[in-house]
Amino acid sequence: MNRQPADAYWATIPPNFSGGPMALKATIYKAAVNVADLDRQQFLDINLTLARHPSETQERMMLRLLAWMMYADERLQFTRGLCADDEPEIWLRNDHLGIDLWIELGLPEERRLKKAASQSQQVALFTYNDRAAQVWWQQNQDKLRQYKNLTIWNINDEQLAQLSALAQRTMTLQATLQEGIIWLSGGEESLELHPAVWQGQA
């Protein structure tokens, strides 16, 4: 299978990136990613470029990459992320400029998820930070059940640390997904991830 060029339209750094002066200090990571999603029968071999904002941790950046792999699609694009409050971390837009998939990270307010659910066919939220995430979930789970197109994932601190350990400025990663389990390898390292589904369907 031919690998897509790094500057293809779905690359993670949008054209005319306007994140302001801080964006100039972003650290660039390149990832050659092979995804075999056996559940969706989705097989991709692509190059991605990730811009890590100065305020973004390595763990969060790698969670962004994991989220991309879990919903892998040639049209799936990283946005300006932390530099654009009105955009998700990752989205899949259709030919009519509508949003088919909106991916968020962190512990957002309910009103942001309401906006996402109203604007996109499907919304996926990836939560992390064990203690804070549990408190957030206890406070918000009843309100969030009304959003039937919202799937909420949680990756615990231990798994996130393992994922972060794979980070390199230039990475080659292979991911196999089946029945909620992700087998991920990079270099001489390999790991098995079991993200928890807090809401929605895996």
Image (cartoon, grey):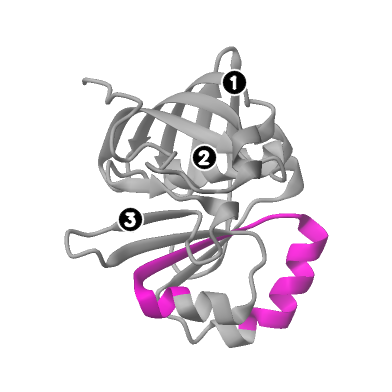
Q: In the displayed structure, does residue 55 sit left or right of residue 127?
A: right
Residue at the image position 49 percent from the left and 48 percent from the top: 18
Identified at 71% across, 50% down, the residue is 156
Q: Amino acid at mark 1?
A: Arg
Between the residue at mark 2 and the residue at mark 3, the CA separation in whole angstroms equals 15 Å
Question: Residue 57, image x and y in percent?
Answer: 72, 41
Q: Is residue 97 above or below residue 30?
A: below
Q: Amino acid at mark 2?
A: Leu
Magenta stretch, overall SS: helix
- Secondary structure state at the residue bearing disc 1: loop
**Where does the magenta region start and end?**
116-141
Q: Earlier in the sequence, mark 1 or mark 3?
A: 3
Q: Which residue is mark 2?
A: 65
Q: CA distance from mark 2 to mark 1?
A: 13 Å
Which is nearer the eye, 28 or 122?
28
Looking at the rendered structure, the kind of residue marked 3 is Leu
Q: Position of residue 189 (x, y in %)?
A: 61, 18
Q: Quadrant of the C terminus?
A: bottom left
Residue 92 disc label: 3
* Labelled pair 1, 3 in contact (Cβ < 8 Å): no
Question: Any mark on residue 169, and which?
Answer: 1
Camera-side mark, 2 or 1: 1
